[in-house]
């Protein structure tokens, strides 16, 4: 019913995004690029961007339906954005260094962002080499309904092997189950919450992958080019290695409107524990 990215949840009116940027800055990140819709630019700059200007470099990239490869037009009836993979691709002209890619309306926690920052600052033994924060499934559920989660399979050396999307995961008593596939989980499985570390190599890969996606799926008005499926294709093609970084950070987000009070309470506890100041600004 509104823009979750602008919903105040902190004790001084902070958004979840405020906490992500705050954590990133204290972990050594010096620049933030907001990927937004063009029609949302004025409101976003005024209500969000201005808060960070002067403290770190701020830039914007715009995801639009007509940002398509040469020779392609927006299919008739298409209204839905092209997905998270396309959103990252939208930043190709303003990002030229290793970067962290996150959702604006998910709280990832300082330990996760610190681990990602450390990985991105370490010279990779091979290139390209990406990373993904892996959260415990049991810490990412909602009390108010089922959730979709990308459950990760990981090799003994910590490298990501694959991500399988489960669309209706829910806790029922002591049982965690995907109601769609009848799959049972222990809760300790690692899942992707779209907290990725990339090098700029990802942009060329996404451009090629997005064209392939359009060739097979452009005619479906609700199809989306997702980061997990794109990266998984790159891994299987031998184009990239991805290290899964197991994190114990608290994750939370507003999947359902009823989740908001628990997010407010969780942030309040972190402020009381001294993890964050009472006012970030």
Image (spheres, rainbow, N blue to C red):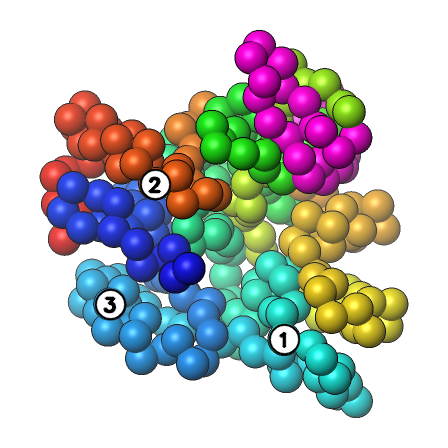
Asked if the residue at tag 2 contacts the one at tag 3, i.e. Cβ–Cβ closer than 8 Å, the answer is no
Image: 103 above or below 122: below
Q: Which mark is residue 79?
A: 1
| First-in-chain label (1 vs 2) | 1
- Determine which residue is flagged by label 3: 47
Residue of label 2: 260
Relative image position of residue 180 (x, y in whole percent): 75, 33
91 lies above or below 192? below
**Are there few (<14), some (14-19), or many (20+) residues within 10 Å of tag 2?**
some
Q: Secondary structure at mark 1?
A: loop
Asked whether residue 131 is drawn in magenta, I would say no
Q: Are marks 1 and 2 in contact (CB under 8 Å)?
A: no
Quarter of the image that includes the N terminus: bottom left
Please, what is the dominant secondary structure of the magenta stretch? strand
Give the Cα separation between the discs numbered 1 and 3: 26 Å
| Res 87 quadrant in image | bottom right
């Amino acid at each position: 019913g509104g823009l979750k990215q602008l919903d105040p949840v902190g004790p001084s009116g902070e958004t979840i995004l405020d906490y992500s940027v705050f954590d990133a800055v204290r972990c050594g990140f010096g620049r933030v690029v907001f990927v937004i819709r063009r029609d949302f630019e004025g409101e976003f700059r005024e209500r969000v961007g201005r808060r960070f200007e002067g403290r770190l470099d701020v830039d914007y990239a715009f995801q639009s339906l007509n940002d398509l490869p040469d020779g392609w037009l927006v299919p008739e009836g298409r209204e839905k954005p092209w997905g998270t993979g396309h959103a990252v691709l939208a930043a190709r002209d303003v990002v030229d260094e290793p970067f962290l890619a996150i959702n604006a309306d998910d709280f990832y926690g300082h330990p996760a962002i610190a681990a990602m920052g450390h990985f991105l600052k370490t010279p990779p033994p091979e290139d390209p080499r990406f990373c993904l924060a892996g959260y415990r499934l049991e810490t990412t559920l909602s009390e108010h309904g089922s959730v979709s989660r990308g459950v990760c399979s990981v090799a003994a050396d910590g490298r990501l092997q694959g991500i399988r999307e489960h669309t209706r995961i829910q806790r029922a008593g002591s049982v965690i189950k995907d109601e769609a596939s009848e799959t049972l989980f222990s809760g300790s499985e690692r899942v992707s919450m779209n907290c990725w570390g990339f090098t700029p190599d990802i942009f060329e890969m996404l451009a090629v992958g997005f064209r392939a996606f359009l060739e097979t799926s452009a005619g479906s008005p609700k199809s989306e080019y997702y980061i997990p499926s794109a990266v998984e294709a790159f891994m299987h093609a031998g184009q990239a290695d991805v290290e899964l970084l197991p994190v114990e950070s608290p994750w939370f987000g507003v999947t359902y409107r009823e989740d908001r009070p628990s997010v407010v309470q969780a942030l309040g506890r972190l402020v009381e524990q001294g993890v964050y100041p009472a006012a970030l600004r």
